[in-house]
Image (cartoon, rainbow, N blue to C red):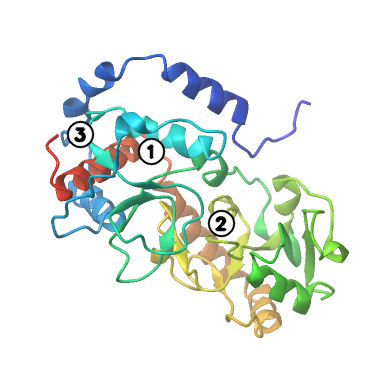
């Protein structure tokens, strides 16, 4: 096994660590909250608040419905267990009697009341969708890519689940499955689109290609984070949904290669970038720099706590 790169989070370690943390009483974390959330000299305060206000856009005060559940009622279930663990990682620092509305899963619409979510539509009227860093064991994967861009294949690689719940991928595969610029394959077998099936390949195999498809599925593209941390380039339409990764802040042809919503310009765009290596290297540098801001675990935790504190303050609850 020596020399084999593992580019994924190890779920066994994730679950083991989080189950053990459940054994620590809440009061231990609550006593530490004030010390954690106080600004420190090493922190860029303006940067912190820009991110906090990006995730939590609540400006007006709001009273949650009485039927809202308390933090103490947040329980681990068979479904969405990673959402529970990631939520509990920050909620345990607060009074368990505080109320909050969590919406777990791939959320593609804005809730009627202020809610804590993993994903939301990108736009100006999404303030009720307060983003937390959820399901991060799946979504927040970064890689160390030692393959120079110039040595990679001049092709677009695409693997992923395809179903009627993901019409964007169906439309793309119908148009480009057999295209000479593309190596595409659906990785799920329980689909009526079985003729597109190909076995899963490792992230390391993906990194042999210059261009990697990052189309949104139900909400965001789950591979976008690790692609942007690599020496390959994400190819995608302008995102419609966003998570903790702030996909709404990504700049076309600066952080990724943008293609039209109907994909009609894919061949033209790939041809251009294959012939413009310097432009590609610039996009890779910009993407890598964007990813770096999510690698400071202490700062990420601080921002999460600040987002949650603002949520309780704006919903008129005493901390």
Disc 2/disc 1 C-alpha distance (Å):
19 Å
Secondary structure under tag 1 reads loop
Q: Is 200 left or right of 120, judged from the image as shown?
A: right
In the rendered image, which quarter is residue 55 located in?
A: bottom left
Q: Is 106 left or right of 181, judged from the image as shown?
A: left
Q: For mark 2, what is the residue? A: 224
Q: Is residue 108 above or below residue 258?
A: above
Q: For mark 1, what is the residue? A: 296
Q: Residue 74, position in %: x, y?
A: 38, 33
Circle 1 or circle 3, nearest the eye: 3
Query: Label for residue 37?
Result: 3
The quadrant of the rendering that contains the C terminus is: top left
Of callouts 2 and 1, the N-terminal one: 2
Depth check: 197 or 245 in front? 197
Q: In this view, does 266 lie above or below 56?
A: below
Q: In this view, does 7 lie above or below 22?
A: below
Q: Residue 12, position in %: x, y?
A: 61, 25
**Residue at 11% across, 37% down:** 318
Q: How crowded is mark 3: few (under 14 residues within 10 Å), some or many (20 or more)?
A: some
């Amino acid at each position: 096994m020596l020399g084999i790169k593992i580019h994924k989070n190890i779920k066994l370690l994730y679950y083991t660590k989080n189950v053990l943390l459940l054994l620590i009483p809440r009061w231990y974390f609550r006593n530490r909250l004030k010390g954690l959330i106080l600004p420190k000299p090493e922190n860029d305060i303006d940067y912190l608040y820009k991110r906090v206000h990006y995730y939590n856009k609540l400006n007006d005060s709001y009273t949650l419905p009485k039927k809202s559940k308390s933090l103490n009622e947040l329980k681990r279930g068979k479904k969405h267990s990673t959402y529970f663990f990631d939520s509990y990682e920050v909620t345990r620092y607060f009074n368990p009697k505080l109320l909050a509305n969590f919406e777990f899963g791939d959320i593609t619409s804005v809730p009627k009341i202020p809610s804590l979510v993993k994903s939301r539509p990108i736009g100006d009227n999404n303030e009720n969708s307060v983003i937390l860093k959820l399901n991060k064991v799946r979504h927040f994967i970064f890689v160390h890519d030692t393959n120079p861009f110039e040595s990679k294949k001049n092709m677009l690689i695409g693997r992923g689940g395809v179903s009627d719940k993901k019409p964007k991928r169906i439309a793309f595969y119908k148009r480009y499955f057999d295209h000479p610029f593309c190596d595409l394959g659906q990785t799920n077998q329980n689909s009526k689109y079985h003729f597109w099936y190909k076995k899963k390949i490792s992230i390391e195999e993906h990194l042999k290609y210059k261009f990697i498809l990052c189309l949104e599925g139900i909400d965001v593209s789950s591979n976008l984070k690790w692609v942007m941390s690599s020496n390959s380039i994400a190819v995608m339409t302008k995102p419609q949904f966003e998570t903790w990764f702030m996909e709404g802040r990504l700049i076309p042809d600066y952080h990724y290669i943008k293609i039209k919503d109907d994909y009609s310009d894919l061949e033209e765009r790939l041809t251009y970038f294959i012939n413009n290596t310097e432009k590609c290297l610039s996009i890779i540098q910009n993407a890598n720099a964007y990813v770096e801001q999510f690698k400071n675990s202490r700062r990420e935790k601080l921002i999460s706590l600040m987002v949650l504190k603002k949520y309780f303050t704006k919903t008129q609850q005493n901390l």
